[in-house]
Amino acid sequence: MATVATGTPQGGPDVLIGRAGPLGRITLNRPRALNSLTHPMLETVRAALDAWAADDTVTAVLLDGAGERGLCAGADIRAIHDDAKRGGAGGRAFFRVEYPLNELISRYPKPYVALMDGITMGGGVGLAGHARIRVVTERSAVAMPETRIGLVPDVGGSRLLALAPGELGTHVALTAATMTAGDALHCGFADHYLPAAALPALTDRLAAGDDPAEAVAELAAPAPPSALAEQRAWIDHCYAADRVEEILDRLHATGLPAAADAAAQLRAKSPTMLKVTLAALRRARELPSLAATLGQEYRISCAALAHHDLVEGIRAQVVDKDRDPHWSPATLAEVTPADVARFFAAPAGGDLHLAG
């Protein structure tokens, strides 16, 4: 990963806030937990961005992650699991801080450079995927893996996925596929490819006050190929269907090993969350802005906190690690349109209103 901010960092130990000349530095600092996000970390990041926006001595902001494994694996889902079992109040409060932060990053008034080096998933995409300058490396592994744990892509990820070329985003969302650097660039999750070895030089140039766009462009290397782009023909055909059941039928009918593997991955996911995810992406294509998409995602996430499959999915994948979730309902046929519609209804505590 890139080096930690120079100068004296401020804030809690889980996120380091510092300055390197005119550069504001944000380093997520929970390497043993793959820099997974907590509520206080989000508040610290928000406070730094708000302060720097009004500080003329700060000309750019750089986001990176401590350790050698990645920028951020997402939210602390063990904490979300435990909170959901208690009623979900903490989860709702977390989303009310996280989603406005994602929206702020998308319109930040100064160049915001995100280094998506290594694992960048879920909430990590929320902090990086809406940045003005998004950098991936040969080590990047970018994903919205929510359907693995009985959830739906959020943090604005449903908008990025919905706007990806053809039906690539639908495939990535439903299967929770991990994108390489080439895939992330092709699908609109990143802008520039730099070798990981060039990241310290980029940091030094930004600390010296160089124009971020020029510095990144001069250090960039040719984009690697995208395996997803090469598979777009069958992906577009299969995922153009508006029902998960028909998507599965089309995947089986292709006779392609890659399509059969995708079908197997879908069959292992929560039937409810597959249908809600597909509906969310189709709706996101018609929404006018990231703010509107985050508002929709807030409704879905609040509903998910009260649904059996979120707690069960995290239990199976992270807590007990038996990889044997028992979804309820257990089949796609049992999930009705009314079941899906409930995820798009205003939550009891009210909607999330974002001015952006």
Image (cartoon, rainbow, N blue to C red):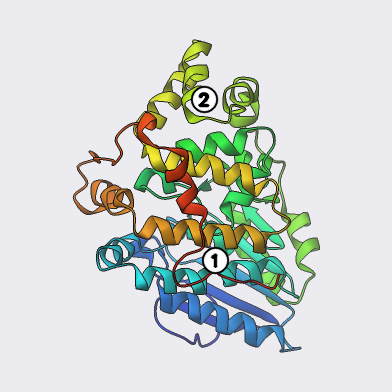
Q: Which residue is mark 1?
A: 64
Q: Secondary structure at mark 2?
A: helix
Q: Amino acid at mark 2?
A: Ile
Q: Which residue is mark 2?
A: 247
Q: Which mark is residue 122?
A: none
Gap between marks 2 and 1, in whole Å?
37 Å
Vertical placement of 89 versus 307: above or below? Answer: below
Q: Amino acid at mark 1?
A: Asp
Vertical placement of 293 versus 348: above or below? Answer: above
Residue 119 lies, in percent from the top left, at: 47, 52
Q: Residue 326 falls in which quadrant of the image?
A: top left
Name the residue: 69% across, 73% down.
Answer: 355
Q: Nearer the viewer, residue 52 or 2?
A: 52
Vertical placement of 46 versus 258: above or below? Answer: below
Q: Is residue 333 left or right of residue 121?
A: left
Residue 235 lies, in percent from the top left, at: 59, 25
Q: Nearer the viewer, residue 55 or 205?
A: 55
Name the residue: 52% across, 18% down.
Answer: 250
Determine crowd level at label 2: few under 14, some 14-19, many 20+ residues with C-alpha closer than 10 A. Answer: many
Q: Residue 61 falls in which quadrant of the image?
A: bottom right
Q: Residue 304 falls in which quadrant of the image?
A: bottom left
Vertical placement of 326 versus 50: above or below? Answer: above
Quadrant in the picture for the C terminus: bottom right
Q: Secondary structure at mark 1?
A: strand
Mark 2 or mark 1: whose residue is earlier in sequence: 1
Determine crowd level at label 1: few under 14, some 14-19, many 20+ residues with C-alpha closer than 10 A. Answer: many
Residue 176 lies, in percent from the top left, at: 46, 40
Q: Nearer the viewer, residue 271 or 35?
A: 271
Residue 217 lies, in percent from the top left, at: 77, 55
Could one spot residue 179 in this view of the protein? no
Name the residue: 71% across, 73% down.
Answer: 108
Cβ–Cβ under 8 Å for marks 2 and 1: no
